[in-house]
Amino acid sequence: MMSIRAKIATLAASAVALAGLATGYAVTSARHAPAPAAAADRTVTLRPGPRLLAVTDRHVSSAALADPAGPRAVSDRECLRVYAAAGTGVCLAPTSAWSYQVVVLDAELRPVRRLDVPGLPNRARVSASGRMVSWTTFVGGDSYTSGGFSTRTGFLDTRTGATVTSLEEFTVRRDGRPHRDADVNFWGVTFAGDDNVFYATMSTAGKRWLVRGDAAARTVETVRENTECPSLSPDGTRIAFKEAVDGDPAKGWRLSVLDLRTMRVTATAERASVDDQAAWLDGGTLAYTLRSDDGHPDVWSVPADGSGTPRLLLPGAESPSPLT
């Protein structure tokens, strides 16, 4: 039986992980390899190519997909989370010790728009076309949550400038019925190819749901319980997600894949607790961050179909984003 001290430690780790603190994700794995030496290099770009974007020591970096553990370019652009697609990037950046911004980047890492956001950076995504940018931050002090914290999730249409500062403004349907409650929280957006439909996590009444949203209609509806941090596959048919073991986040998360047509779930070969919003490297491979016991991050990959074994992809890095 788990001791009281162990339970407290586990729950504390889970809260810190959801917060997206700079110390990163709570993981049971101790696997870690030192990052290769990398001098500052301003040649990092977001242009499509066979490269993997990531955060190395709080700075945007990139490496060749063919040899991700090899030479790495590290820019002077500071970000706690980064993601990019079609030459557009999103950077969740510190502006002071406890202040952060969503920074939209062009292909050369130049800021084109800034938006102040509350809380601590947690998740970031860009739609495949580069049009839609989304983010999640951790916000403390909301008394209606039992853990004393909540999240804020929003998105920006880079074409029109339309901004949603919080998905909590949207109309919610839970199990087909209207649902309104002060405890609703959202995190981890992933957009479909039409730049309108999206998926995210919603928590309410002690449960965590996969929701399907309509940006234009400003609505979300529940799809499935115990499905967090979704990441839509390039062909739009599957969602990679983290599934709480036995429905209890305190026991960790299993990286899994949901087939949206059959609703069949396939657990990946990764047995460590993955507290991350995985990225699809291609139609069959996932990339995700694990942290060792001493807090060092590494990017790993694993087949999405449950086969194979996890493979160290990018040592000493986090927040992976393929640029292909």
Image (spheres, rainbow, N blue to C red):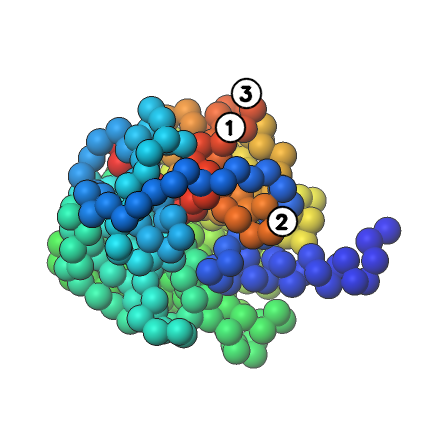
Q: Which marked residue is nearer to the observer: mark 1 or mark 3?
A: 1
Could you tell whether 131 is left or right of 178 in the image? left
Q: Could you tell me which residue is drawn at 46 percent across and 43 percent down?
A: 316
Q: Which residue is mark 3?
A: 308
Q: Label for residue 311?
A: 1
Residue type of the residue flagged with mark 3: Gly
**If you read the primary sequence from the N terminus, does the residue marked by circle 3 or circle 2 appear first?**
2
In front of the other: 259 or 101: 101
The amino acid on which the numbered mark 1 sits, given as a three-letter code, is Arg
Q: CA distance from mark 1 to mark 3?
A: 9 Å
- Crowdedness of circle 2 by 10 Å Cα count: few (<14), some, many (20+)? some
Tag 3 secondary structure? loop
Task: Residue at 37%, 49% (x, y): give it.
Answer: 55
> Disc 2 marks which amino acid?
Asp
Q: State if disc 3 and disc 1 touch (CB < 8 Å).
A: yes
Q: Residue furthest right?
A: 1
* 251 horizontally vs 318: left or right: right
Which quadrant does the C terminus fall into?
top left
**Mark carried by residue 293:** 2
Horizontally, is 203 left or right of 8 in the view? Answer: left
